[in-house]
Image: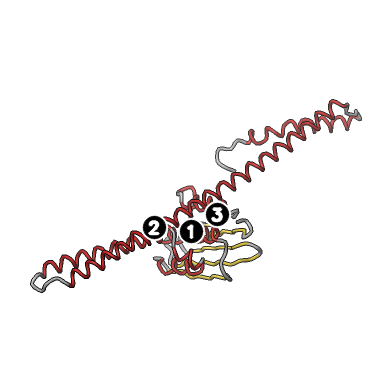
Amino acid sequence: MHPGTRWGHLLLPYVPVAGTGVLLVVQLVRGVPMDNVEIIVEVVVIALLIIRQAVTLGQSAGLVASRARLVLATDLTRRQLERDLHDGVQQRLISLGLDIRLAEASVPPELPELRQQLSAVMAGLNGTVEEVRELSRGVHPAILTEGGLRPALRALARRSAIGVELDIRLDGRQPEPIEVAAYYVVAEALTNAAKYAESTLVQVCVEVRGGYLHLTVSDDGIGGADPKRGTGLIGLTDRVEAMGGTLTLESPPGQGTHLQADFPLGHV
């Protein structure tokens, strides 16, 4: 239950039903038949409760759909930003680098200092290109859009600061929103394992079974992960639930951390 929820607010709508139910039982025990007014009141109370439940379910479904639309819109924006960085800023920097190389090659031998300056500028430009590349990859990895979850997770494993064992049992592509959500679950888990868990190995398993994409990430670190102490896991929970999935975390102290996400493939 969400912190701060009051039981009284949840149970209040059921008090009239409970009251009429008790009254009905008492009358049945006494052998007293219900008159028309009591029957009408009972029917009205039950009908109001059913209507309330239907409205609540409709509101919950609308909230889930709204969260899913928000996540999809955010992912679309991130993808567009990645394209702008890759096709715009990064390509412009590379073009400038080629111009500097041409200028450096045309420097007369009697101007070694100018050649050194251009070489230093080129080195700095190369560093900037790499930073832009890393930034665009963090915003939304192009490899995920182009190749799917398998190559994207392999790229994550290669860049990880700690060892990663991948067990990917996928045939073909999955719905893109689910691939994106699964990717960020793994990315966040690897980041946490490297920064906080003091782990040396992370095992990642992805498979499709029973209409679900099942994802597990386990590390051999110190455990004790608590979603309440940071926004990363909370954000992942929101993202997974927006796709109709569930996210569970087991992190006993001294026994590593086990993260599991299950996505219904028919939800998207």
For the residue pair 260 and 84, the one nearer the viewer reads as: 84
Q: Quadrant of residue 199?
A: bottom left
- The CA distance from mark 3 to mark 2 is 27 Å
Query: Considering only order in the chain, which callout, 1 or 2, is on the residue closer to the N terminus?
Result: 2
Please tell me which residue lies in front, 250 or 243: 243
Circle 1: element type = helix
Q: CA distance from mark 2 to mark 1?
A: 21 Å
Q: Which residue position holds label 1?
A: 184
Corner quadrant of residue 57: top right
Pinpoint residue 179: horizontal percent, then vertical percent: 53, 61
Q: Which residue is mark 3?
A: 240
Relative horizontal placement of residue 187, taking residue 53 as reference (left or right): left
Residue drawn at (36%, 63%), measured in percent from left and top?
133
* Badge 3 element: helix
Left or right: 189 in relation to 99:
right
**Quadrant assignment for the C terminus:** bottom right
Q: Earlier in the sequence, mark 3 or mark 1?
A: 1
Q: Which numbered mark, 2 or 1, is in the foreground of this view?
A: 2
Q: CA distance from mark 3 to mark 1?
A: 10 Å
> Residue 142: x percent and y percent?
44, 63
Looking at marks 3 and 2 on the same chain, the residue that comes earlier in the sequence is marked by: 2
Residue under label 2, please give it.
84
Q: Is residue 18 left or right of residue 26?
A: left
| Secondary structure of residue under mark 2 | helix
Do residues under tags 2 and 1 come within 8 Å of each other at their CB atoms? Answer: no
Q: Identify residue type, mark 3.
A: Val
Q: Is residue 107 above or below residue 62?
A: below
